[in-house]
Image (cartoon, rainbow, N blue to C red):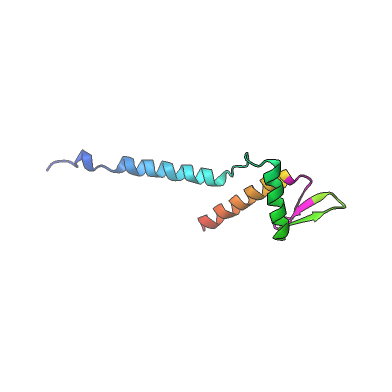
Amino acid sequence: MPGPDPHDDTSRDHEQFEKEQLAQDRDAAGADTADVDDRTAQNLINDLIDADVVTPVPEDRVLVHEPSGTAFDSSKQLAVFHRGWTAGRDADAEGE
């Protein structure tokens, strides 16, 4: 009886698929924050304030990220944090 046909061997396809899935998982876990400039940050913060996700505290000169309870003195830091926080929550939700 002849052995398996080498043209029907799909083990390499499976290995390639697994590599691609792992790469996608790594991409989802690492939110890209390099593109947050001052204008983008300010627009995001304004949207988050309107959505009651961020509360400005003028007397302390900070912005409070309500879901996490974290305070920031920079809108850019808060924007980067929120993007990472959101990406982390989305990744957790997908894993459930």
Q: Residue at x 37, y 41 (%)?
A: 16
Q: Observer-nearest residue: 87 or 76?
A: 76
Residue 3 location, quadrant: top left
Horizontal relation, residue 49 to residue 19: left or right: right
Magenta segment includes 67:
yes
Residue 19, position as x, y percentages in the image = 42, 41
Residue 68, position as x, y percentages in the image = 71, 55
Q: Observer-nearest residue: 37 or 92?
A: 37
Residue 40 location, quadrant: top right
Q: Residue furthest right?
A: 59
Q: Residue at x 38, y 44 (%)?
A: 17
Q: Residue at x 31, y 42 (%)?
A: 11
Count of numbered tags: 0
Q: Observer-nearest residue: 18 or 41?
A: 41
Horizontal relation, residue 28 to residue 58: left or right: left
Residue 49, position as x, y percentages in the image = 73, 57
Residue 4, position as x, y percentages in the image = 19, 42
In which quadrant of the rendered image does the N terminus lie?
top left
Residue 69 location, quadrant: bottom right
Which stretch appears magenta? 63-75
Q: Residue furthest left?
A: 1
Magenta segment includes 32:
no
Q: Residue at x 68, y 51 (%)?
A: 44
